[in-house]
């Protein structure tokens, strides 16, 4: 049990569609970060949410957006899907100000066809 | 672009041999973390290094943070088949984490 729950585990979408991925952080964690991991690559930082606001953002286009809810859970939305968006999307939770590692979820495998 | 470079990309060793992976950053890092990802799994946090020149050990694993806080290494002594997986470093700079591309370790029994 990773402590971080992501849904769905797998998803197939058509190019041009929109997708929403969900994440529930580990109990006690208040910060959620999203990463994109292409096959054979390291995770790439998309953005981080704390107190329902985006705190930091990586080099991803505006097609990638997110939201954090009062219960600290989070959503990642991707619009106008491209084939290149196919990847494993990882959610990682942590406690703000406590820099001792992220707890990652098992990820959502998104395939765009 | 990616700010943390990690080498080697792959390493195949015989069980009992040692293994080392290296990370280098183009900028000074506030800290560096190491993760292990098993095939088909998600990254699992191993350790964090914060101080310049810091060395930490976890059983057969030794982690080092360079004096300039721009490089780090993970050394595994006497590898076992359970060590198989991809090892990632993740350096923090200005509140963002930059993952290396990982070193995939294969251990032959």
Image (spheres, rainbow, N blue to C red):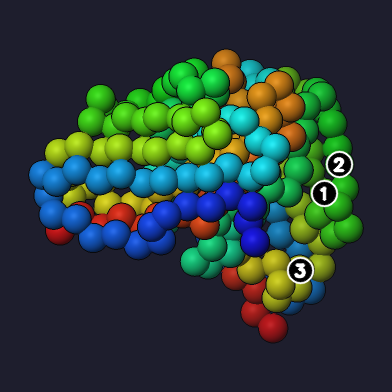
Crowding at mark 3 (Cα within 10 Å: few <14, some 14-19, many 20+): many
Check if mark 3 and mark 1 are on a common chain. Answer: yes
- Please, which chain is the residue tagged with disc 2 on? B
Q: Which label is found at residue B79?
A: 3
Determine whether B103 is above or below A51 in the image: below
- Mark closer to the observer (2, 3): 2
Hey, which residue is sitting farthest front in the picture?
A70
Chain name for mark 1: B
Q: Which residue is mark 2?
A: B56
Q: Residue at x 76, y 43 (%)?
A: B47
Mark 1 or mark 2: name the one nearer the start of the chain: 2
x and y percent of residue B94 in the render?
Answer: 57, 16
**Residue A50 coordinates in the image, percent (x, y):** 54, 23
* Mark found first going from the N terminus, 2 or 3: 2
Q: Which mark is residue B21?
A: none
Q: Quadrant of residue B106?
A: bottom right
Circle number at residue B62: 1
Asked if residue A18 can be seen in this view, the reply is: yes
Give neighbour class at mark 2: few <14, some 14-19, many 20+ (Cα, 10 Å).
Answer: some
Circle 3 chain:
B
User: In the image, is A23 to the left or to the right of B60?
Assistant: left
Image quadrant containing the C terminus of chain B: bottom right
**Marks 2 and 1: in contact by CB < 8 Å?**
yes
Task: Tell me how far mark 2 sits from mark 3, CA to CA.
Answer: 18 Å
Tell me if I can see residue A44 in this picture.
no
Q: Residue at x 54, y 62 (%)?
A: B41
- Earlier along the polypeptide chain: callout 3 or callout 1? 1
Horizontally, residue A12 falls left or right of residue A67, namely left
């Amino acid at each position: 049990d990773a402590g971080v729950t992501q849904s769905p585990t797998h998803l197939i979408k058509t190019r041009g569609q929109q997708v929403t991925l969900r994440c529930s952080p580990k109990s006690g964690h208040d910060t959620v970060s999203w990463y994109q991991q292409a096959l054979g690559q390291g995770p790439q930082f998309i953005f981080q949410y704390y107190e329902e606001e985006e705190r930091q953002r990586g080099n991803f286009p505006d097609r990638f957006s997110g939201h954090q809810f009062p219960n600290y859970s989070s959503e990642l939305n991707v619009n106008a899907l491209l084939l290149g968006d196919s990847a494993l999307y990882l959610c990682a939770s942590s406690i703000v100000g406590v820099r001792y590692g992220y707890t990652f979820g098992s990820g959502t495998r998104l395939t765009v066809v | 672009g990616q700010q943390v470079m990690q080498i080697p990309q792959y390493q195949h060793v015989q069980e009992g041999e040692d293994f080392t992976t290296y990370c280098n950053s183009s900028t000074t890092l506030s800290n560096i973390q190491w993760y292990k990802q098993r095939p088909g799994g998600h990254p699992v946090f191993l350790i964090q290094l914060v101080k310049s020149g810091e060395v930490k050990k976890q059983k057969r694993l030794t982690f080092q943070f360079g004096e300039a806080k721009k490089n780090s290494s993970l050394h595994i002594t006497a590898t076992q088949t359970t060590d198989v997986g991809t090892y990632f470093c993740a350096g923090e700079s200005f509140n963002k984490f930059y993952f290396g591309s990982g070193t995939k370790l294969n251990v032959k029994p």
